[in-house]
Image (cartoon, rainbow, N blue to C red):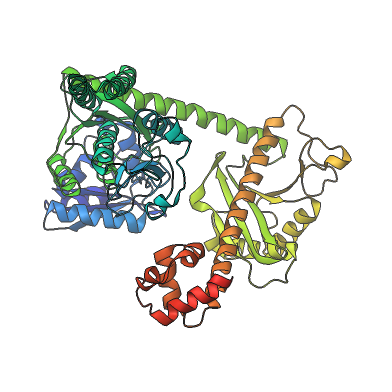
Amino acid sequence: MTIPETLTEKLSHVSTSPGVYLMKEKGAGIIYVGKASNLKKRLASYFTRIKQQDIKTRALVAKIETFDTIVTKTEKEALILESSLIRKHKPRYNIDLKDDKRYPFIRINIKEEFPTLSIVRKIGNDGALYFGPNSSSGAVRQTIKLIHRTFKLRKCKTKEKSLRNRSRPCLSFQMGDCLGPCCYDVSTVDYNGIVKEVILFLKGRTPELISSIKNDMLNAAENLEFERASQMRDKMFALKKTLEKQVAVTTDFADRDVAGIFSSPMGCFITVLHVQNGFMLGARDFNFSNTLAPDREVMSSFLRQYYKLPRTIPKEILVSVNLEDKVLVEDTLRLESGHGLRIMHPQRGDKAALMEIAVGNAKKALEEFAESDQAATELMNRLMRKLNMTTPPKRIECIDNSNISGSNPVSGIVVFEDGKPKKSDYRTYKIRNTQKGDDYAYMAEAMKRRFGKGDDSLPLPDLLMVDGGKGQLNIALANLKALNLEDKFSVIGIAKKDEKKGETADKVFQPNRANPVIFGRDEGLLLFLMQVRDEAHRFAITFHKKQRTKSTIKSALDTVPGIGEKRKFALLRHFKSIKKIREADQEELLKVPGMNSKAADNIKKYLGES
């Protein structure tokens, strides 16, 4: 591959200062943004010694028509500008690490008098301790179950202020699994001692905890407190049992994360191993199959994004590639964590062996992803043949409506690409200009808003599905004809089976065909289409419920004199729901900014009656 003279000429005028470079493809705009301490040296590494570069980098260079550079005073300024430009332009080949809001955390509020454990998916700035994120909610529940079996924390979800309202303790107390602070005078010192033990356990300090419990057991025995000593013994044995299931991977018993990257023409994966106190506690895989950036740049960008999300940053991070900007990344993570840390690329010993495990897991994840990708391609090819399409339906969209007796009508569109949901392209529509109760008109409005914007409606689907039978299908075809899109993509309708007529399967209808498609042995194709339809149904219903809830909240607060938009917003932001506003006493209501005694009295009077 030869580099165009225009690029070579442009390279000769590039500054040697720190800065950011923007690579552009003809007709596609910016496809990659990077930073460098020396712009000229970094760009020269792309456009010289092409044969020595890996396949990914050669593929990226082949797409570059031109590039621009922005000079900064320092490398740190270049880092900030790079992040800003990536957020703005969303280049195709830069990595984009999504946040962890869907992953569960274990939360314990140490500010409470008698803290309890809960599972949450968002971290609040509330002084509580959060442990996670965890990739499996099932594993989190098992951990909490083990803690409740071993430590006598209260399990009830009763709020602190209502804790003393119980007349008798729950079954957990009677079974000896809880101290019963709801009904009995429990020492906060004793309870906080249990909380500290739970925190040690969640931090992976189990050996330290076992040693502490053993000392307590021996002291209790010396003081002839045999019942307490036997409880300590049982707790110690339970913890030793969990420790036996953990794998010791280093002999220094340190906390560290290990990030291994593996890339090939099939894509790129990073695996992060979490090691606490020398024990492997878990691993997570991250897919960056769209990137063509060199591994060292992918890893650098990944670390900066990964540790920006709410999580504990260890004092040592092992990586499988040498980072050119290692010092800069370390400085960035020190600011995020508030403590010293170092990034290492080990060459031998236990740490190098850990690196091999991480890279091996990343390779395995990539191979499994490639296999599933091939399966999805085969599924799309089978669907193409079954529906007599000219190309595989790489992009499938499905539209569904939702309302109750015509109230709060909405439509939702879900998107599947290569057989998998693409939630970033999901769309919702509030129906505005349509007669109440007209399902066909709802669909017409949603389709016009989705497909009636010319080039802004791109990309178009290869296959559009509508939830319903021939009637809905014909309405969809008429709407597409009015938008001059009648031959741009295939359209089908999918209707649920009518068990009263003896039907055993859902039906798929195509234009100009009286009878539904017969799937025969290809029942898997029908199941896939049903999955897409069910996802559209779930998505539309969820959006409709949100609209109904908003409308209920609005109508309830609108009945209260003296509560305008500002107070309504402040109340909802403070209490989160009408139910909590109704339950609040006057003192709590007056804590809300902008509230006065008269407005609080009106809330109690009007909401108390509803």
Task: Please tell me which residue is depicted at 33% across the width and 35% down the height of the picture.
Answer: 56
Q: Most extreme residue toward the front, as rendered?
A: 224
Image coords of residue 132 (percent x, y): 33, 39
Image coords of residue 438 (percent x, y): 75, 66
Task: Please tell me which residue is depicted at 66% across the width and 38% down the height of the picture.
Answer: 384
Figure check: 575 above or below 231: below
For residue 29, say whether it is visible. yes
Q: Quadrant of residue 253?
A: top left
Q: Quadrant of residue 51?
A: top left
Relative placement, left or right, of 563 versus 282 is right
Relative placement, left or right, of 575 versus 49 is right
Quadrant location of the N terminus in the rendered image: top left
Figure check: 593 above or below 82: below
Task: Please tell me which residue is depicted at 60% across the width and 63% down the height of the picture.
Answer: 548
Total numbered circles: 0
Image coords of residue 262 (percent x, y): 32, 29
**Which of the pair 200/302 is nearer the observer?**
200
**Which of the pair 285/207 is nearer the observer?**
207
Image coords of residue 40 (percent x, y): 15, 48
For residue 18, say whether it is visible. no
**Which of the pair 326/404 is nearer the observer?**
404
Quadrant location of the C terminus in the rendered image: bottom right
Figure check: 569 above or below 59: below
